[in-house]
Amino acid sequence: MLVTAAAVAVTIAIPARRIIFVPIALVFIYTTVLNMFERPEGLQIAAWFIVTIIVASLISRVMRSTERRAASAHSRRLTARAHGRSAPALFYLNSSGANCTR
């Protein structure tokens, strides 16, 4: 499969010599397809790897999307004090629409 991908990549990448590389790529494609039908075990193993990676990625995405991203203003001030920095001022609008600093 890897050699087939390389043969197709070279055929696409070098248009000037395509007349030479197309038959070679076709032979590799033919043998790859024939091999997949004769021995499907490799295809099944590859499918399991792909499914496992997709499931792990989805689980990771769900876990990352449900975690808390920002702490409260109080904990940010405590963290800034602990590291010897001044806490950033937080701006918000009060009910009258005026800017306030917290």
Image: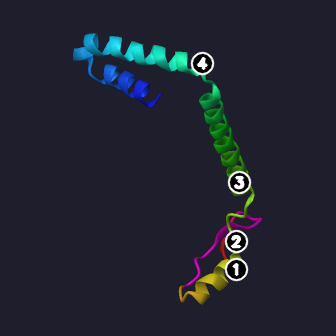
Q: Label 3 amino acid?
A: Ser
Label 2 environment density (alpha carbons within 10 Å; few <14, some 14–19, many ≥20): few
Q: Position of residue 45 (x, y in %)?
A: 64, 35
Label 4 environment density (alpha carbons within 10 Å; few <14, some 14–19, many ≥20): few
**SS type, badge 4:** helix
> Which one is in front in this view, the residue at disc 3 or the one at disc 1?
3
How far separated are the C-alphas under marks 1 and 4? 62 Å
Determine the residue positioned at 57% across, 21% down. 36
How far separated are the C-alphas under marks 3 and 2? 15 Å
Residue underneath mark 2: 71
Q: Label 4 amino acid?
A: Glu
Looking at the image, residue 100 lies above or below residue 2: below
**Numbered range of the magenta stretch:** 86-97
How far separated are the C-alphas under marks 4 and 2? 57 Å
Q: Earlier in the sequence, mark 4 or mark 3?
A: 4
Q: Earlier in the sequence, mark 3 or mark 2?
A: 3
From the viewer's side, name the closer residue of 7 and 78.
7
**SS type, badge 1:** helix
- Pointer 3 and pointer 1: residues touching (CB < 8 Å)? no
Determine the residue positioned at 56% across, 87% down. 83
- Residue 12 location, quadrant: top left
| Residue extending farthest right | 95
Q: Position of residue 7 (x, y in %)?
A: 36, 23
Q: Earlier in the sequence, mark 4 or mark 2?
A: 4
Residue underneath mark 1: 75
- Residue 47 location, quadrant: top right
Q: Give left or right: position of 75 versus 16.
A: right
Determine the residue positioned at 68% across, 67% down. 70
From the viewer's side, name the closer residue of 74 and 69.
69
Residue underneath mark 3: 65
Q: Earlier in the sequence, mark 3 or mark 1?
A: 3
Looking at the image, residue 8 lies above or below residue 84: above
